[in-house]
Amino acid sequence: MDEELRTLTERVRAEVEVGAAGYERLLASDSVDELAAVLTEPGQPLWARELAAFRLGVAGDRRAFESLVLLLNHRDPPRCASAAYALARLGDPRTARAAAALATNELRVAYALHPVRLLVELRAPESVPALITTLERRLRPHDPYRRVALACVEGLGALGDTRARTVLNECLAHPNLAEAAVHALARIPGQR
């Protein structure tokens, strides 16, 4: 069993109160149609929708896209993490645009960490502009979203795009980001 699926199933198993047979059925099912039906059937618990969407996403079935994007923006970080993992493997061309929209949404910035990390993994055309925008907003005095800012700095370094130089240089003046910014700048081609 894949490590991410094992982590998800252990977490979901703890949530299952009623319907343990349904849990085992979803875990064992090889039918993508059965899994997809869980996403649209009324009254399905969140754990069932999450497990079905994850399994469909990893299998490359695009019917999971909307559910995974909703989970990527969930208040529970483990749900966000499993959704990001599945979305990275889904292969849907809408994924980067959705992750960029979530990462740059100031009303949901508290939940932007996993969309930021997903953008770095996708290396899509939307990735660098979204990370720059998100990071610029985090450079305000007393911004409480240091982990999101740090993920942006590290992600921009990993992507190594020259467009990030300006914002990374601005990060040098922020003690919480300066060391990461130095490392990120060192990964940008042509940086002195």
Image (cartoon, grey):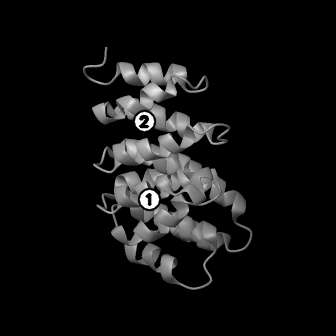
Q: Between residue 68 and residue 51, name the one nearer to us.
A: 68
User: If you read the primary sequence from the N terminus, does the residue marked by circle 2 or circle 1 appear first?
Assistant: 1
Name the residue located 47 percent from the left edge and 24 percent from the top edge.
Answer: 181
Res 155 label:
2
Name the residue located 60 percent from the left edge and 78 percent from the top edge.
Answer: 44
Q: Position of residue 116 (x, y in %)?
A: 47, 46
- Assign a secondary structure to mark 1: helix
- Assign a secondary structure to mark 2: helix
Q: Is residue 184 visible?
A: yes
Quick one: label 1, few (<14), some, or many (20+) residues within 10 Å?
some
Name the residue located 41 percent from the left edge and 42 percent from the top edge.
Answer: 132
Q: Is residue 5 above or below residue 178?
A: below
Disc 1: which residue: 101
Q: Position of residue 59 (x, y in %)?
A: 36, 60
Q: Position of residue 156 (x, y in %)?
A: 39, 34
- Residue 187 lies in quadrant: top left
Q: Amino acid at mark 2?
A: Gly
Name the residue located 48 percent from the left edge and 46 percent from the top edge.
Answer: 134
Q: Position of residue 133 (x, y in %)?
A: 44, 46
Q: Between residue 70 and residue 147, name the one nearer to us.
A: 147
Q: Is residue 177 above or below residue 15?
A: above
